[in-house]
Amino acid sequence: MLTKPTVIRWLLVALLVVYRIEEAESAGSDHKYKPNDEVPIYANKVGPFHNPSETYRFFDLPFCLPAHIKEKPEALGEILGGDRLVSAPYKLPFMVEKDSEIVCRKRLTKKDVSKFRSAVAKDYYFQMYYDDLPFWGFIGKVEKDKTDPGEEKYYLFKHLHFEIRYNKDHVIEINAKADPSAVVDLTEDKEIEVEFMYSVKWKETDVPFETRLEKYSQSLSQPHHLEIHWFSIINSCVTVLLLTGFLATILMRVLKNDFVKYAHDEEAADDLEETGWKYIHGDVFRYPKYKSLFAAALGSGTQLFSLALFIFGLALVGVFYPYNRGALFTALVVIYALTSGIAGYTAASFYHQLEGTNWVRNLLLTGCLFCGPLFLTFCFLNTVAIAYTATAALPFGTIIVIVLIWTLVTSPLLVLGGIAGKNSKAEFQAPVRTTKFPREIPPLPWYRKTVPQMAMAGFLPFSAIYIELYYIFASVWGHRIYTIYSILFIVFIILLIVTAFITVALTYFQLASEDHEWWWRSFLCGGSTGVFIYGYCLYYYYERSDMSGFMQTSFFFGYMACICYGFFLMLGMVGFRAALFFVRHMYRSIKCE
């Protein structure tokens, strides 16, 4: 039987395995070279600069082909991230300088010219890796026609300048710049003879090899960026303090008055009519409707919460350093699979406490509640990527691997966790007895309905994180690098605290108005921040980004819908747990007949 120490032990082993896998991948070579040694250089992908999901294989454009095209074996996370590394047409031996070296002479057909012109018009960039160091460049430029300002001229860069810095026997840094004067005019549809060239310059530096990747994370570590991050945290902390003060001075005072009032009523006269939250003491712990779905939502939310904690743990120990290709995706897949036992145990255990009997259906609901929408979204978006022949389209072999992980790891652990939860001896702890028939809920004003309450509940947690959201979006859906995981973790903790506090406050006011159906309401109010985050997606797409096209739009809104749904389940679980703790404490403090 699965016990909590066993689950934790297996998860710690899993984290160590993920860390070792990524460490082994990065240490596949010692990165030490002698003069004239060949240094591996791979071409990765090309695509519109403002559409990060819409990337294509490097040789989908008619560049010069190397003598032998060799594909670099890639891990699961790299493939999920859209990386498709192949040998590049350039030769950059260690400490060997070159001047106007010819890559190839190529005759571009009208079709080739049209392909390049379309790519230049869409601001295509390329990405390559040299000794596992990423570098980028644009393939061309667009300029106004000097003779006719209303027309545009399209130019293809044909000469790349590589500037490489080294420290003793290590490559430290590489930059690629195109020669703006060495261009080919692509404006007209006609065949063109092109001579592609490159130059290489080597410069010595004193930057140690161990810190060569730090330059990729320095942009967000600049003082003005850090000021914004700390302003975000201060803003969030003020929100927490205000909310805490509200609960301490208002809610607790009201509760104290309620306790005094109810104690006085008990001593005075038995025939006085009860009012407020004590009046519904016989209904407040009545099990919710659709309890199987409710338990499944709690199980899925608990699993996603565990996943977030383990991802933060890996981030804080430095696993997700800049351009550790595929590390995050690998960790997400592996840890999600291994935490499915937590979902099964939580859902089945709580379903058992709610006196549910059809635990098989409950486990099926738990397994499909998050994975189902994610799978349907993936099928649609993968079909779109295949239609575009983009690198985001997963190969058939990768899909088989993911299906096997789900079949051989996720599902068995979910069932084992469910069996352990079903056989647990835990009982639902209700401090008061539940009456046989439910009381009628009195008519409520519109602002006490579910949707207005969700709007109030989601606004405060969202206001505590919205500043940090921009940087996260710019990293996930742009080309910024996000490495300040400690600040992100603080913001995450603040988000949890604000969500718990606001849900508790709204639950009290709901019970005080004699509305005893608080179970689903607390879950929906806690998770409503996910709806606000999705609303921010609309703002970010139309106001803060230059993304365009059907593929990029569908990827952005499709996968963000899944992420926001995950936040809804996770924060809904947090809100309900906080509300349950509060309601138990409140009714345990009074005497109810």
Image: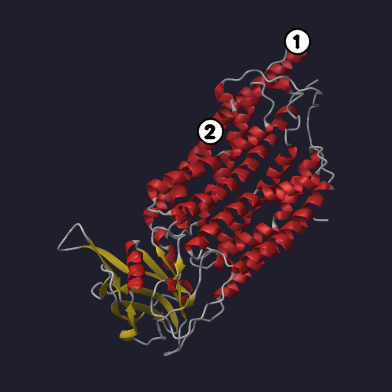
Q: In this view, does 157 lie to the left or right of 588?
A: left
Task: Note whether 117 is above or below 302 in the view shown.
Answer: below
In what quadrant of the picture does the N terminus appear? bottom right
Nearer to me, 439 or 411: 411
Q: Estimate how packed mark 2 is, as few (under 14), some (14 to 19) or many (20 or more) residues with alpha carbons within 10 Å.
A: some
Note whether residue 317 is visible. Answer: no
Give the structural element (helix, strand or loop) at label 1: helix
- Separation of marks 2 and 1 at Cα, in angstroms: 41 Å
Q: Which amino acid does label 1 sit on?
A: Ala
Which numbered tag is attached to residue 510?
A: none
What is the quadrant of residue 201 in the picture?
Answer: bottom left
Q: Residue furthest left?
A: 147
**Residue 547's spot in the image, x, y percent?**
40, 54
326 lies left or right of 306: left
Above-or-below relation of 373 to 526: below
Q: Which of 335 and 446 is in front in this view?
A: 446
Please, which colouring scheme is shown? secondary structure
**Residue 592 in view:** yes
Kind of residue at badge 2 = Ala
Q: Quadrant of the C terminus?
A: top right
Earlier in the chain: of badge 2 and badge 1, it is 1
Q: In the drawing, what numbered circle is on residue 455?
A: 2
> Residue 453 location, x and y as percent?
57, 30
Q: How crowded is mark 1: few (under 14 residues within 10 Å), some or many (20 or more)?
A: few
Percent x, y of residue 240: 53, 38
| Secondary structure of the residue carrying numbered label 2 | helix
- x 65%, y 42%: residue: 573
Which of 146/243 is in front?
146
Which of label 2 and label 1 is nearer to you?
2
Looking at the picture, how far across and down is residue 227, in whole percent? 40, 51
Residue tagged by mark 1? Answer: 268
Circles 2 and 1: CB distance less than 8 Å? no
